[in-house]
Image (spheres, grey):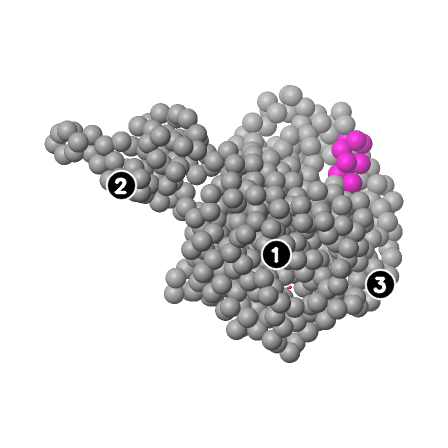
Amino acid sequence: MKLIGGNYIAGLLSSEGESTFKGINPLDASELPTDFYEATIEEVNKAATKANEAFAIYGKKSGKEKAGFLDAIADEILNLGDALIDRCCAETGLPVGRITGERGRTMGQLKLFASVLREGSWVDARIDTAIPDRQPVPKPDIRSMQKPLGAVGVFGASNFPLAFSVAGGDTASALASGCPVVIKAHPSHPGTCELIAMAINAAIKKTDMPVGVFSMVHGKSVEVGMAIVNHSLIKAIGFTGSNKGGKAIFDAANKRDEPIPVYAEMGSTNPVFILPNALKERGDEIAEGLTNAVTLGVGQFCTNPGIVFLNEGSISSGFQEKVSNYFEKVEANTMLNEGIKAAFDLGVKNLANNDKVELLAKGNDNSIGFKGTAHVFETTAKNFLKNNSLEEEIFGPSAITITADSKEELLASAKELKGHLTATLFASESDLEDYKDLIEILEQKVGRLIINNFPTGVEVCHSMVHGGPFPATTNSRSTSVGTGAISRFTRPFCYQNFPNHLLPNELKNENPLHIFRIVDGEMTK
Ligand code: NAP
């Protein structure tokens, strides 16, 4: 399968610009074949215009038709076979097993949305029938449901080259809700992006969708991304990536003449609290699990636990020593790209230079290519309370333990936390009784609260919440993983006094789609 290196604008390859770049193999910093053409502003304009034209058709497709399209994308991704796996491993340094698993997750996500569309009740249909003889004024017939917003701009992250990229969660939820997508390909895995774009285009042909429903533009500079954000025909943004990038895009979207919603899913340090009895009973097991969770995939997960709160008993329990022993055995491993490796090295250097922070241990050092060395630090809750920049994400295999002198100090530290994707409690039954107030504090701080599991895995299912208060995201009212994400690119729309034949099938009297609806205050089918 030959890569071309062009932009995919409504089904056509386009390379009008002069600036090109290559994919880089992080294992040895070598350039991979194929020149990728950065999109011009005119190409972004064409993609947005075609997406807007497609919206007039695609936005009206039935749930079954859109489900067929999503299933076809999943099938075409599988049809890419080893070409996809090989290129993706070469561009990311991630192992075959991980990429194969992520491909399955990406396909599963598309198929899960397809099943939601076939069932159909996601539109949240509400019907209030008319009461013409109501006094003192008649009640009109009012019906509402969720409708797609329009063309959506999507940005994927480098660390999930499939599941949070071209056919990842945001693309799946936008297409499921009826919104065309213009995606900014990630420059860290451009060939992978192109292969997935081919699969989506094949699915468009197979299921007879309007060609403008999907476009992909390359860009190694922020101009291309900003051109998407600022385009007047783009009606919402889905972003996964760094806090810096997400905030810049959010601010730009709010400065537009017509501000638009930005769902930016950003970095997080995912605080872990190890409570006294759990520490006493399972300290060694938790230390080993923590080391694995921090260093899994060279720590390049947004759910990687980077900050660990302990109580005063932790020193006497020898927990820090146990963690140090495990960290010292961790091999340095290849990070996704030069920028991520440089940012990681700077982050750990800054922590090491902080005179209130001690380096507990580091893993095997190996500076070849873009390898990252695991680090674990320690400080006190008193220091954390004076300097909560210690909770900022260092993207990679690094964590800091923070020891509180008392329960009160632990709770005070929890209250100081900003927004995160997750928080975790390692706790016995009696710890949970004793620390009910900690649970209440953390409910205000995160999108997912976990007991006795590490936060790294994010199940794709109906009830998952992958989000949280700022700065974990720019919109805490949504999730980027799981079928709940379908509503991020929709808005409620209301029909008043419409004749039955003009209503969408979802709201017709006879309920032809057999979906769950609230009719005159009662859930019915
Ligand atoms: P990134 O550097 O922010 O890049 C993400 C995308 O945004 C890229 O296409 C990038 O393009 C673009 N971009 C970044 N800054 C921009 C700006 N100012 N203007 C316009 N476009 C901009 O993030 P990354 O390094 O790929 O991913 C790692 C980060 O993602 C980590 O912080 C991780 O925690 C986070 N992450 C979060 C989640 C989640 O669900 N919350 C999931 C996975 C990863 P250029 O490279 O061309 O600038």
Mark 1, residues whose alpha carbon is within 10 Å: few (<14), some, or many (≥20)? many
Q: Nearer the viewer, mark 3 or mark 1?
A: 1
Magenta-drawn segment: 283-292
Q: Are marks 2 and 1 in contact (CB under 8 Å)?
A: no
Screen quadrant of the C terminus? top left
Mark 3: which secondary structure? loop
- Which residue is disc 1 drawn over? 201
Along the line of sight, the residue nearer the viewer: 63 or 218: 63
Residue 347 visible in image:
no
Along the line of sight, the residue nearer the viewer: 406 or 163: 163
| Amino acid, disc 2 | Phe
Residue shown at 39% from the left, 37% from the top: 506
Q: Are marks 3 and 1 in contact (CB under 8 Å)?
A: no
Q: Which mark is residue 498?
A: 2
- Where residue 13 appears, x then y in whole percent? 62, 67
- Which residue is disc 3 drawn over? 28
Query: Which quadrant of the picture is home to ligand 1?
Result: bottom right
